[in-house]
Image (spheres, rainbow, N blue to C red):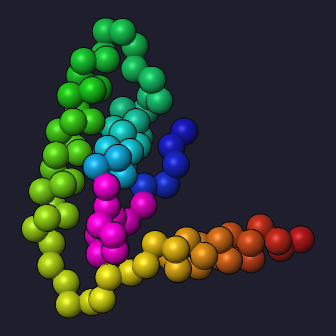
Amino acid sequence: MCRNIRQLHNFEPPATREEVESAALQYVRKVSGSTKPSAANTAAFDAAVSEVAAATERLLAALTTTAAPRDRAVEAAKAKARAEQRYSRG
């Protein structure tokens, strides 16, 4: 039903608003058990996505770390290599 929610903290460049909203949408979909709410639940669903996105942005702004920021391209390449190894098993 949902893609994996990806880590957003400590990347260079920082997470975009779109990435935060996408993660919020995936979270609300998972929690609600619905990829598309009914007409009766659309307002509640949309409000939840907005609230989760806002909370996520506050969290990311408040987190601190001494670790060097990770590079998105490097992390994507590592994930691709792990997936190739995982799915190439016969």
Picture layout, residue 31 above or below residue 19: above
| Res. 31 visible in picture | no
Residue 74 counted in the magenta span:
no
Q: Residue at x 74, y 77 (%)?
A: 85
Q: Residue at x 30, y 89 (%)?
A: 68
Q: How many marks?
A: 0
Picture layout, residue 86 above or below residue 30: below
User: What's drawn in magenta, residue-wise?
Assistant: 6-16
Residue 52: x %, y % from top left? 22, 44
Say which quarter of the image contains residue 59: bottom left
Residue 4 as seen in the image, left or right of residue 59: right
Q: Residue at x 33, y 70 (%)?
A: 13
Residue 4: x %, y % from top left? 49, 54
Residue 62: x %, y % from top left? 10, 68
Q: Residue furthest right?
A: 90
Q: Residue at x 34, y 74 (%)?
A: 12
